[in-house]
Image (cartoon, grey):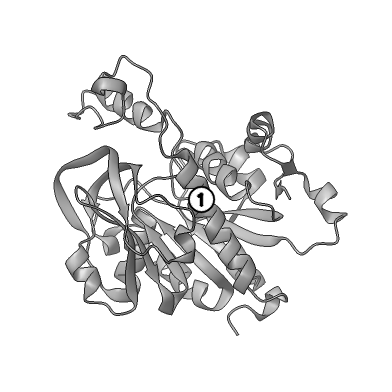
Amino acid sequence: MPITLPSDLPAFDTLTNEGVMVMGHDDAAKQDIRPLRIGLLNLMPKKIQTETQFARLIGATPLQIDLQLIRMTEHQSKTTSAAHMDAFYRSFAEVEGTGEKFDGLIITGAPIEHLDFEDVTYWDEIARVFDWTQTHVHSTFGVCWGGMAMMYHFHQLPKHILPHKAFGCFRHETVEKQSPYLRGFSDDFVIPVSRWTEMRDAEIAERSALRTLLSSPDVGPCLVEDTAHRALYIFNHFEYDSGTLKEEYDRDVASGTPINVPQNYYPQDDPTKEPTNRWRSHAHLLYGNWINQIYQTTPFRIETIGS
């Protein structure tokens, strides 16, 4: 089954051209199926790129997905047109006010790692989002800063500033091989990493509700399950396109920002060569497994979520 998107959303044509099954709302309404309702709270500056990355992954399953785009209420995007935001996004305040519920919610990262959590301008609202998920969302997926912020909110776990940016494609290991979220995973694989902060294994291990599923000897824990809050937290970027790390590297070089060549990304670590994607299959596995777990466990009557 396809992912349901507005036919004029840029991701619609991009994914159609890639062979992803995409359906407009009018056609979806004709099918006698309850689609899984997945929200994307998009905190990234490049909204359109991020929409497409996540829609690609959650739209590759056999289930019909109704993707809803959400933004913070008072935080205005400086890099995406107001016309795009007005056409395709609703504020969290609007979503909260309707009382509607979601089978799943993805909360993206945000380029605000240098700030303490509670110094973020929209911290009060996003803390309200986290609490709202407990009564209105069946399963929440916090990505990078989004995952770290949820762990801080629910478990008082701090993030730690790294001495230098973790930047590149790092080898990871499957820690919990029996987890349904890791069905089909290899024992060893690479994931793109781009962050200045980390969470620490020892502190996660102190919280009995948390379980590390994926980890790296080089960049630490990656994927953590929080059963008490029906949540997954991932600190690295399976959703990245082949060229996303290159874009970040080229941007920093052009601006004169000190940056290392992303490790294990370019062939022979040579930035003049085209990077190779070695994580795409595991990206589809993880998000496909997440969607499948939601499908297996979410109530048929969506209004009963959280009750």
- Name the one closer to the observer, 181 or 45: 181
In the picture provided, is 22 more to the left or to the right than 127?
Answer: right
Q: Position of residue 211 (x, y in %)?
A: 33, 70
Check disc 1 and report its element: helix, strand or loop.
Answer: helix
Rendered position, 211 above or below 40: below
- Residue 264: quadrant of the picture: top left
Q: Quadrant of the C terminus?
A: bottom right
- Residue 146: quadrant of the picture: bottom left
Q: Amino acid at mark 1?
A: Leu
How packed mark 1 is, by other alpha carbons closer than 10 Å (few <14, some 14-19, many 20 or more), is some
| Residue carrying label 1 | 285
- Residue 103: quadrant of the picture: bottom right
Residue at the left extreme of this rendering: 163
In the picture provided, is 4 more to the left or to the right than 218?
Answer: right
Residue at the right extreme of this rendering: 30
Rendered position, 179 above or below 301: above
Q: Position of residue 127 (x, y in %)?
A: 40, 69
Rendered position, 42 above or below 206: above
Q: Position of residue 90 (x, y in %)?
A: 61, 55
Q: Position of residue 204 (x, y in %)?
A: 24, 69
Residue 151 visible to an observer of this rendering: yes
Q: Residue at x 51, y 74 (%)?
A: 132
Q: Residue at x 26, y 73 (%)?
A: 156
